Amino acid sequence: MMKASIEKLLNDQIKFEAQASMQYLAMASWADAAGYSGIANFFYSQSEEERLHMTKLVKFVNERSGKVLVPALDAPILEFDSLKALFEKFLNSEIFVTEQINKVIFECLEKKDYNVHNFMQWYVTEQLEEEATARTLLDKLNILGDDRSGYYLFDKDIEGFIGDSK
Ligand code: OFO
């Protein structure tokens, strides 16, 4: 049986992954409406990935005979002042998720639950990749600065990052 503290943290993580999925869906939709189809596709795909991360946790908790509490979610941010603001939100969201995963890992070690610890390693690797992608994209936008003509290329190039982290 899973320790109650670990079960609670895994349920929290289910919420954070679901929250990220809805946030990225909102970001995809914002980009879509603004005419950035590449950026929209990128975030539609990220949103799907986060949903899979959520489901993977739901299945795992059930396999371990834990109790899954499918959560209510906070409303996502719907509006962004700029592409830079959009990608800053992306990076901050990934940093937040990484911090939460680290909390799960810490608790697993405290409670000597090496099974959950092992399962969570997949998320550790995933977060490394996603944070790196978010940083790379933000760096590119910072290079562009106010050069709006570069946004066209950025919107094309970003398609190459789709599905980078699975
Ligand atoms: Fe769930 O992978 Fe990032 O947040």
Image (spheres, rainbow, N blue to C red):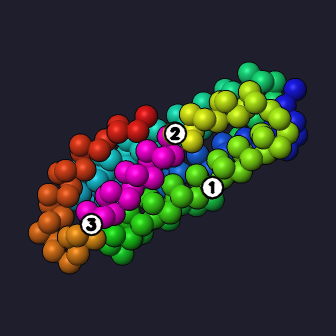
Tell me which amino acid carries mark 3: Leu
Q: Does the residue labelled 2 lie within 8 Å of ligand 1?
A: no
Task: Give the numbered dot on residue 125.
Answer: 2
Pointer 3 residue: 141
Residue 152: quarter of image: bottom left
Q: Are marks 1 and 3 in contact (CB under 8 Å)?
A: no
Image location of residue 124, percent across then percent down: 57, 42
Query: Which residue of the protein is positioned furthest toward the left in this rendering?
Result: 149
Could you say which is closer to the camera, residue 17 or residue 133?
A: 133
Residue underneath mark 1: 99
Pick the quarter of the image with the N terminus: top right
The answer to whether residue 39 is visible is yes
| Labelled disc at residue 6 | none
User: Do callouts 2 and 1 mark residues in contact (Cβ within 8 Å)?
Assistant: no
**Is tag 3's residue or tag 2's residue first in the polypeptide sequence?**
2
Disc 3 to disc 2, how far (Cα)?
25 Å
Q: Which of marks 2 and 1 is nearer the N terminus?
A: 1
**Pointers 3 and 2 in contact (CB under 8 A)?**
no
Q: Is residue 58 visible?
A: no
* Residue 133 rendering spot, x and y as whole percentages: 37, 51
Name the foreground residue: 131 vs 87.
Answer: 131
Q: Which residue is drawn at 38% across and 65% down?
A: 86
- For the record, the magenta segment spans 126-141
Secondary structure, mark 2, is: helix
> How many discs mark residues in the rendered view?
3
Task: Determine whether the residue tagged by mark 1 lies in a helix, strand or loop.
Answer: helix
Closest to the camera, between mark 3 and mark 2, is 2
User: What residue sits 53% from the left and 51% below the top?
Assistant: 20
Q: In this view, does 154 lie to the left or right of 74?
A: left
Q: In this view, does 156 lie to the left or right of 14?
A: left
Gap between marks 2 and 1 measured at Cα: 13 Å
